[in-house]
Every structure is written in C-alpha cells, then in structure tokens.
C-alpha cells in the first residue's frame, strides 16, 4: 500500500484554512463597506405635494388614514442621515409658491471603520435615537400641514402642472429626488386644463394632451425622479370618481419628460 504523503496533506489543509480565513475577512469587509456606502450615498430630497383644494377632503376617515400612513412611511424610508431634505408644498391655485415646510436632517452617521464591536453598537444606538427623534418631529409637522384647512380663494383651482418647476429646482441639487402627490390629480385651471369640466375622453387623447403639455416644460430637467401619485379614493370607487384616463395622462406626461419610475397608489 502506498504511504500517504504527509507534507502534501499538511499543505492542502493549510490552503483550506487560508481560503476560509480570506473568505471570512471578505464578508466582514463587505459588511463594513455596506455601512459606509449608506453613509456616503447621495442625499434624498423628498417633495410632498398635498392637495389643498375643495375636491380633496382630508377630514374623510379613509383619506385621513391613508395619507397619515403614507407620510409616516415616506419619512421612515427617506429620512436617514445628515443632508436628507424634506419639503411640503400645497397644491392649489399657486402651487409653485405653496411651500409650507422645509426641513433638513441633521443626524450624522458615524464612520465605524476600525471600531470594535462595542463601539459600533454604541454608535448605532446613538444614531437610532437621534434619527428617531428627527423623524418624529418631521412627522408631527407634516401631519399638521396635512390637516390644515384651506379656506382661501386659492382652493378654487388645482394647478398641479406648476409643481414641475419645483421638481426641476430640486433636481439641480444632485440629490435623489422622490416626489409624492397626495391628490386626486384632477388639474383644474381656468386658463388651462380643467379635468373637472373636460377630462381626456380616452387614453389616446390623454397621450396627446400629455405630449403637448410636456413640450411646454421642455426647458425643465427633472433628471428622472421617483414619482408617486397617492390618490384619495377607496378601491370601490367608480371610474366617474377615480377616472383612469386622468392618472394615465400624468403617467404619460412624466414619461415624456424622461421620468422612469411612476407609480399610482
């Protein structure tokens, strides 16, 4: 019988140990890099447009619950670190001048590179407490804006199109821009589109109008933000109330402006 080659076995075993050690080191490094990547990622610029016209009733229990939950979720997802910005605009006759809240996150994520496990845990606890405090403050201010009633003359028109220059301005910051419309998306302007009087009759007309209107804003670079339309309608609403051609118009309008991510909730 052939005698085993002990030097070869030892060498092979040593190589296995080396590979395992390298593998462990790689996992640890990747985990650390993920934390640093989050800290060094671009800031998030959140724009919330809340409809303050007569057609959206935030005192309705269904609408109130849906919008309160939406705001809480948005804040939880988008406010993470120093530099994240959060703004609320009111949709009405003068939407582009309707900013009612502008806050900047001040919580800084510590650089944990080189820290031991105890210090990393302490830094994480400190961050969690601080960011929770900021999120709670932003949520409180946001709910106050949501529940504010608009009894002024500005509630007679719904100028959603004038939100486009606001989005373009946010895009200039090079942040990740996320836009949320808490609205029925029924544009209603006396000297422009009035979907209350004349909505698009079908998808074909909605596409045509969207292309025409997008051309008017061709000088505004939106840089493809994420756009969400959060509608105040329950799932049982009829098409007369929740008109699908209206939201289709907005989807096509933003697509014509280069936006890739458009959702309807």
Image (spheres, rainbow, N blue to C red):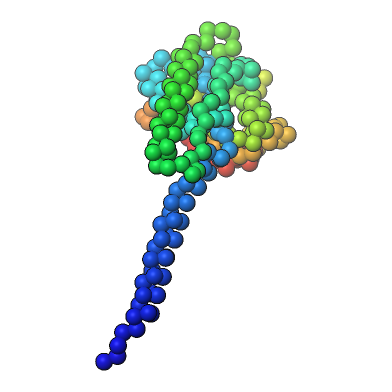
Percent of width and height locating residue 201: 55, 33
Residue at coordinates 46% horizontally, 19% vertically from top-left?
Answer: 137
Q: Residue at x 50, y 43 (%)?
A: 113
Q: Nearer the viewer, residue 8 or 95?
A: 8
Q: Quadrant of the N terminus?
A: bottom left
Residue 86 in which image quadrant? top right
> In the shown orientation, is residue 80 left or right of residue 175?
left
Q: On the rendered structure, is 169 left or right of 69?
A: right
Whether residue 31 appears in this view of the structure is yes
Number of marks: 0
Residue at point 45% right, 31% down? 127
Q: Residue furthest right?
A: 219
Residue 250 against residue 64 in the figure, above or below:
below
Seen as rendered, the residue at the extreme left is 1
Q: Position of residue 13 (x, y in %)?
A: 36, 72
Query: Can you name the residue that lies furthest to the front here?
Result: 7
Kindly give the residue lying farthest to the bottom in the view shown.
1
Q: Quadrant of the C terminus?
A: top left
- On the image, the x and y values in percent for residue 4 come to 31, 84
Nearest the viewer among 217 and 55 is 217
Taking the spot 61% from the left edge, 39% from the top edge, the residue there is 224
Residue 141 pos. (x, y %): 48, 17
Q: Nearer the viewer, residue 171 or 28?
A: 28
Would you say residue 34 is visible in this rendering? no
The image quarter in which residue 63 lies: top left
């Amino acid at each position: 019988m052939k005698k085993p080659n002990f030097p070869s076995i030892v060498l092979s075993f040593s190589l296995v140990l080396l590979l395992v050690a390298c593998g462990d080191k790689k996992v640890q490094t990747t985990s650390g890099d993920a934390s640093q990547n989050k800290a060094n990622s671009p800031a998030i610029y959140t724009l919330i447009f809340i409809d303050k016209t007569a057609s959206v009733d935030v005192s309705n229990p269904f609408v109130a619950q849906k919008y309160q939950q939406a705001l809480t979720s948005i804040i939880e997802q988008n406010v993470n670190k120093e530099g994240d910005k959060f703004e609320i605009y009111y949709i009405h006759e003068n939407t582009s001048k309707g900013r009612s809240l502008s806050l900047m996150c001040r919580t800084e994520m510590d650089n944990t590179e080189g820290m031991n496990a105890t210090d990393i845990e302490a830094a994480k606890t400190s961050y969690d407490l601080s960011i929770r405090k900021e999120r709670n403050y932003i949520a409180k201010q946001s709910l106050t804006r949501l529940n504010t009633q608009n009894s002024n003359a500005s509630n007679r028109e719904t100028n959603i199109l004038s939100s486009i220059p606001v989005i373009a301005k946010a895009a200039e910051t090079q942040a990740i821009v996320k836009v949320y419309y808490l609205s029925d998306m029924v544009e209603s302007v006396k000297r422009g589109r009035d979907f209350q009087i004349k909505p698009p009759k079908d998808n074909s007309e909605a596409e045509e109008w969207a292309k025409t209107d997008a051309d008017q804003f061709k000088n505004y670079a939106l840089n493809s933000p994420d756009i969400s339309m959060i509608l105040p309608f329950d799932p049982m609403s009829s098409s007369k109330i929740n008109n699908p051609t209206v939201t289709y118009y907005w989807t096509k309008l933003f697509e014509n402006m280069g936006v890739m991510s458009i959702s309807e909730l």
